Amino acid sequence: MSNKKFHLSQEGTDTSIELPVLSSTLGQDVIDIAKIPETGCFTFDPGFGATASCESAITFIDGGKGVLLHRGYPIEQLAEKSDFLETCFLLLNGELPTPAEKAAYEETIKSHSHVDSCVETFFSGFKQGSHPMAMLCGVVGAISALYHDATDVANAEDRVETTNRLVGQMPILAAMCHRHFSGLPFVASDTSLSYSENFLNMMFGTPGAEPKISPVLIKAMDRIFLLHADHEQNASTSTVRLSGSSGANPFACIAAGIAALWGPAHGGANQAVLEMLEEIGDESKIDEFILRAKDKEDSFRLMGFGHRVYKNFDPRAKVMKESCDEVLAELGLENDPLLKIAKRLEQIALEDEYFVEKKLYPNVDFYSGIIMKAIGISPEMFTVIFATGRTIGWISHWHEMLSNPYRIGRPRQRYTGYTKRDYPG
């Protein structure tokens, strides 16, 4: 707590209260408004755009300066020097692992890289072609039945075991969603492979055949997971925290987060990028669509440019662009029609005065969508892969909340309905 105080008085009355200002290590300090109800009022903040809903030491974002830190480490450094599982360890534990801790953690996650045989039965209940996010949300929620009696959310060891299960099983479930959606047989998990290599093999491999996955694609997929691992108190993370505050089963909490992520305003941005490229259709039409994007009266928007949080640039985009260029070169797709449109749009966004002035730079969704399209991942799977990477962020926030004193979430409202009235007759 800082020495600063915020004094609030109500006009026309003698009511006055003093609100303490709480210091943050980075970013804005916050006003503790717990005493506000003493005035007879609540605060009104639709969308919680000006409200800190919790304390957290996991991730910090400064959108104006293009800063994203995980436990203090810049995302660019983690993407260049770390890998996804090491970043998982960091988010959960607060520090980077020693080499021995990293090796042990990787083995722990591998030990959880399988799912119960009944999970295949869960998938059989979905029609072939069912949306992968519907399947993922349903199956993760259903798995809560497997661990319900074995998980005490008040026990720290149980919570850590839960995080390991989720990190280990989510790529397995994600790959199974893809295979069932595509009408293909499941490929068994192979613990001799790295995390991202195993995922790609389960996605595109042949049952019983030797895995043959390009190291370039493995690196790109690992980076996609890493760059989506956490993003502070977004809609899905807040949903997981709110669900967890009731003491709910953690798998059910993650299923709630998946449901929130599914919304096009949250996790569907990279799928929207591909839909936009398909709408443009041909390089010859790019100038026409650029003019439409600049026209405020036109409903067309360039997807994958600019970001609600980052008002300067998305710090994840630069390293994702590197992976994008590497993947296109590896697969020889520089002349793919849609990808050529994407590269031209990228050039325009970086050079055109309109986009530069408004800071509409390509963001992480723009490049991740191109990468996944190039690898052969269907757009319906994009948000599933987002959820796979984001699971560690969700469960780290859940664990952090339950490791400290907390209260069940209970937002207030501004009521605008009828006053009391009597039933007729």
Image: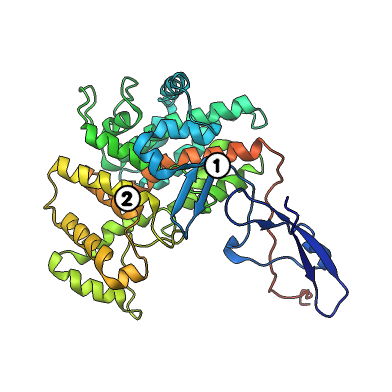
The x and y percentages for residue 397 are 57, 41
Residue 252 placement: quadrant: top right
User: Which residue is depicted at the point 42% across and 35% down?
Assistant: 170
Give the side of residue 59 with respect to residue 345, left or right.
Answer: right
Residue 304 visible, this orientation: yes
First of labels 1, 2 by sequence position: 1
User: Which residue is depicted at the point 52% across and 45% down?
Assistant: 59
Mark number, residue 318:
2
The x and y percentages for residue 366 are 31, 55
* 132 in relation to 10, above or below: above
> Could you tell me if the residues under marks 1 and 2 are in contact, i.e. CB atoms within 8 Å?
no
User: Which residue is depicted at the point 33% across and 61% down?
Assistant: 361
Q: Nearer the viewer, mark 1 or mark 2?
A: 2
Mark 2 neighbour class, 10 Å CA radius: few under 14, some 14 to 19, many 20 or more? some
Mark 1 neighbour class, 10 Å CA radius: few under 14, some 14 to 19, many 20 or more? many
Residue 150 visible, this orientation: no
- Along the line of sight, the residue nearer the viewer: 124 or 60: 60
The x and y percentages for residue 382 are 33, 48
The residue where tag 1 is placed is: 58
What amino acid is at disc 2? Lys
SS under mark 2? helix
SS under mark 1? loop
**What's the distance in space between the residues labelled 1 and 2, CA to CA?**
22 Å
User: Which residue is depicted at the point 21% across and 42% down?
Assistant: 326
